[in-house]
Image: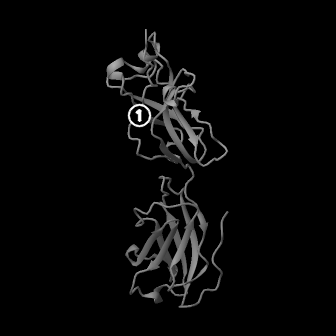
Amino acid sequence: KVAWVQKCPPIHIVGSHEVIRINFANKDALIPITVRSPLTPIHGSLAKMKSSNNSRLEKVVLQYINSMDRAQSTWKDGKDKDGKVLDLTSARIAENEYGYSTVQWNTKDLQDGTYKIRVATFCDTIQGAPEEFSEFSSDKITVHVDRTPPKLARAPALYMDSNQPIRLQFQELLSCNNTLDMVELFVQRDGSSVQVDTKDLVTVCERDTLVISFRQGFPMESVYGFDSKLVVRNVQDVVGNVMLGSAEYSLVFTGQGVQLEGKGNVFK
């Protein structure tokens, strides 16, 4: 009697072309990963496939690897909130009749960095058989973990040439979707603090830097020589972390070509 040996069952991550971003807001959250088993409508659930008498299927697990760490070459098993390996052949993971199931991946202990995840099926090894008979791997998804709110890398100098833009460099790439409420400028005049209308400020986001300048035609004499205060808040990085609180910097705007103090402080 001849029996055909089946390849290890295929498995796919739904939305495998998306990038998962994990930030400060969901640092303790479980990340849902939806998986599809195309053979389930034919042979039943993954748990049923594993338990059948002639099955070679051993496990179907979510795995991850740190793609930035060249010293790490071994995929690690993902776990749930209770620390149990996310094995989709387990009866505790619900799978519908069409082969879809969703697992909750616990990412709490992941350090900041870039990872790849996959779902892999493992079957008992057949000596001399091609790899696809003992293992199948889904497409890989990129996962960016960044739980650190954006911080300034360089502050402006105290004395600024009012004809030159103010540059605020951060330690990471910024989200440039909305710069309207990131910057406020106050000028101390006649014993009171007067806010410069936000319409008179032009804030441009360039990768990791905010570039702030006065609009064309702004009456520069209204700020020359006066003590000023620049307030920065609501800055967001590309992963979605928002700057904690606000930062304030003292400035004095000088005439054209006069900048009396270096390039500003550098933060480490």
Answer above or below: position of 43 versus 264: above
Q: Is 23 on the left or on the right of 1, as rendered?
A: right
As helix, strand or loop, the secondary structure at mark 1 comes to strand
- Which residue, given by chain and number where applicable, does mark 1 sit on? 12
Residue extending farthest to the front is 1
Question: Which residue is pictured at 59% across the width and 62% down the height?
Answer: 171
Answer above or below: position of 256 versus 83: below
The image shows residue 7 at horizontal and vertical percentages of 45, 25
Answer above or below: position of 6 versus 69: above
Question: Who is closer to the viewer here, 14 or 42?
Answer: 42
The image shows residue 124 at horizontal and vertical percentages of 54, 20
Task: Identify which amino acid the numbered label 1 is placed on.
Answer: His
Question: Which residue is pictured at 47% across the width and 31% down the height?
Answer: 104
Question: Who is closer to the viewer here, 245 or 227?
Answer: 245
The image shows residue 61 at horizontal and vertical percentages of 51, 28
Question: Which residue is pictured at 50% across the width and 55% down the height?
Answer: 242
Answer above or below: position of 80 versus 169: above
